[in-house]
Amino acid sequence: MLTIILKLIAALIVLFGIILIFDARLITKEHFGFGDQNEATDGLKILGFIIAIVGALVFYFI
C-alpha cells in the first residue's frame, strides 16, 4: 500500500515538472514582472526538467 502511495506521489512530481517545462512562458508572464522574461523562462524549464528527472528516478527505484 505504501509503495502505491509513493508511486502516485512520484507521478505527481513528474507531472508538475512537465507542466513547468511546457507552460514556462505563461507562468513567467503571469507571475514575474521584470524585463528579461527569456532568462526566467529558461530557469523554469531547467527547474522543471530537474524536478521531472527526480520524480522519475523515485518512481523507477520504488
Image (cartoon, rainbow, N blue to C red):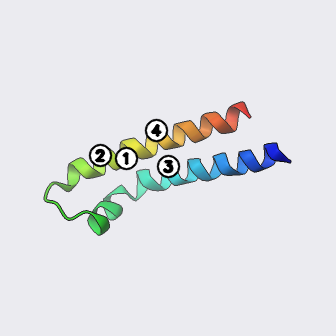
Identify which amino acid the numbered label 3 is placed on.
Answer: Gly
Identify which amino acid the numbered label 1 is placed on.
Answer: Lys
Q: Please tell me whether residue 30 is drawn above or below residue 34 in the rendered image.
A: below
Using the numbered discs, state the Cα–Cα distance from disc 3 to disc 2 in whole angstroms. 13 Å
Identify which amino acid the numbered label 2 is placed on.
Answer: Asp
Whichever of labels 3 and 2 marks the residue nearer the N terminus, that label is 3
Few, some or many residues within 10 Å of mark 2 (<14, 14–19, 20+):
some
The residue pinned by badge 4 equals: 50
Whichever of labels 1 and 4 marks the residue nearer the N terminus, that label is 1
| Label ID, residue 17 | 3
The residue pinned by badge 1 equals: 45
Q: Please tell me whether residue 61 is drawn above or below residue 9 in the rendered image.
A: above
Using the numbered discs, state the Cα–Cα distance from disc 1 to disc 4 in whole angstroms. 9 Å
For the C terminus, the quadrant is top right
Task: From the top left corner, tell me how far across and down residue 61 is, in percent.
Answer: 70, 30
Whichever of labels 4 and 2 marks the residue nearer the N terminus, that label is 2
The residue pinned by badge 2 equals: 42
Q: Pointer 4 and pointer 3: residues touching (CB < 8 Å)?
A: yes
Whichever of labels 4 and 3 marks the residue nearer the N terminus, that label is 3
